[in-house]
Image (cartoon, rainbow, N blue to C red):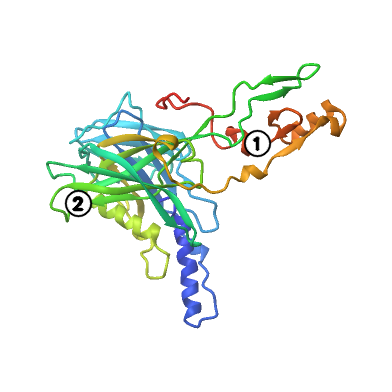
Amino acid sequence: MKNMKGLSARIVRSFGLGLLLLGCVEPFEAEVADFQSVLVVEGNISDANEPYVITLSRTAPLDAKGATPERNAIVRVIDGEGASFTLTEFTPGKYLSNPLNFVGCAGKTYFLSVITSSNQRYKSEIVTLKPSPPIDSIYFEREIRLTDAGDSLDGVRIMVDAHDPLGTSVYYKYSWIETYEIRPHYPSFYEWDFSVTPAAFVRRNPEINLCFKTDSSRQVLITSTANLKADRVSEFEVNYVSTVSFRLKSRYSILVRQQTISEKSFRYWSEVKKTSESLGTLFDPQPYQLTGNVHNVDDPEEPVLGYFDASSVAQKRIFIDRKKDLHGLTYPGEPCISQLKTFSPREEGDVFKDEFNLFILWGYLIVDGEGALWAPPECADCRVHGVLERPSFWPDTP
């Protein structure tokens, strides 16, 4: 429910626009006094041996910067046999389970219990942790799309195939985590060391020519096979990756996670998807209608947003290498080509003084020859865009 504030703002703006189109001249303004802070619960447990995160927050007024974390709550997951597992708050409003103490089990039932710092008690409906069939394959194909401005956008669409021979899954929810290499346009292997006298030209340590960046999905990715003859997911697009960023410039990887959810959960996420993708007109469903499966124990009429769910996780990873896999894609012009500075110490005077000043301003010597070539950080230092630490699953890079 991270987009609640933005959705509300679009609804307010669209409502005002509708009045103007009908001939009204007085703009509609939301009454701040009418605002009601509502608890938002986000979280899912699975059978994966990993920490589970439950996020608690409160909706904020339109003029606020974001949702308010619900801090210092007592958060527990309780199974059908009465065993209770407490989650620990590791950042404001985010509560983490300990995989050494608790891992979900397919077929078992669970519910969420929350007691806020003001002693308000909340409880989710009982959910069953459904098993998930494996992912058959993840693959990609080139596709050129048009931007809102009408320009061509080259890239690849990433798709998933899966099937359940028992025909009991039916409702699927997907998410992904992508990781990609960042290689600067102008590698910089040397730097001046001004800690010694005279200053020395030394090899960089660590090197700054290969970094990594990781992002995760933010869209609601759901599909159903309820109206199909077989419980089979085919060519379901989970992501579109364009050539505009670093993602496809070197090596790209995506880990796709598949969950089997209940029909009720599917209906809830369908409404979330429609609301988040709508234009926010007067006739669209209001965000406060998106109540999930959590309620106030002492006040059932209190609106509570979000959904607590349990489902097995099937996952699969693929790598895409530009040199091996991406032939014929078009990439936009490289802005770094026009971002170089040349420098000749014989023309500029004192070598140490001038090179020191240029080093402070730019800092990245690319070529040392008759003159010197310098590039700005965003064109020569991968740390501007990512981190140096190589993921444990990343293959050796030549």
Residue 296 visible in this rendered orientation of the protein? no
Rendering coords of residue 21 (x, y %):
48, 79
Whole-angstrom CA distance, mark 1 to mark 2, is 49 Å
Q: Amino acid at mark 1?
A: Pro
Q: Amino acid at mark 2?
A: Thr
From the viewer's perspective, is 334 left or right of 92? right
| Residue 271 locus on image (x, y percent) | 32, 57
Nearer the camera: disc 1 or disc 2: 1
The residue positioned 35% from the left and 55% from the top of the image is: 272
Q: Is residue 259 left or right of residue 69?
A: left
| Residue pictured at 34% horizontal, 29% vertical | 50
Residue 380's quadrant in the figure? top right
Q: How many marks?
A: 2
Image point (16%, 42%), residue name:
164
- Residue toward you, 41 or 355: 355
Identify residue for label 2.
Answer: 225
Q: Position of residue 140 (x, y in %)?
A: 34, 43
Residue ID at (30%, 55%): 270
Give the crowd class for mark 2: few <14, some 14-19, many >=20 residues within 10 Å. Answer: some
Residue 19 or residue 369, whichever sits in front: 369
What is the secondary structure assignment of the residue under circle 2?
loop
Q: Is residue 55 above or below residue 303?
A: above
Residue hosting label 1: 377
> Visible in this render: residue 146?
yes
Q: Residue furthest top?
A: 197
**With respect to residue 130, does 28 lie above or below?**
below
- Which badge, 1 or 2, comes first in the chain's sequence? 2
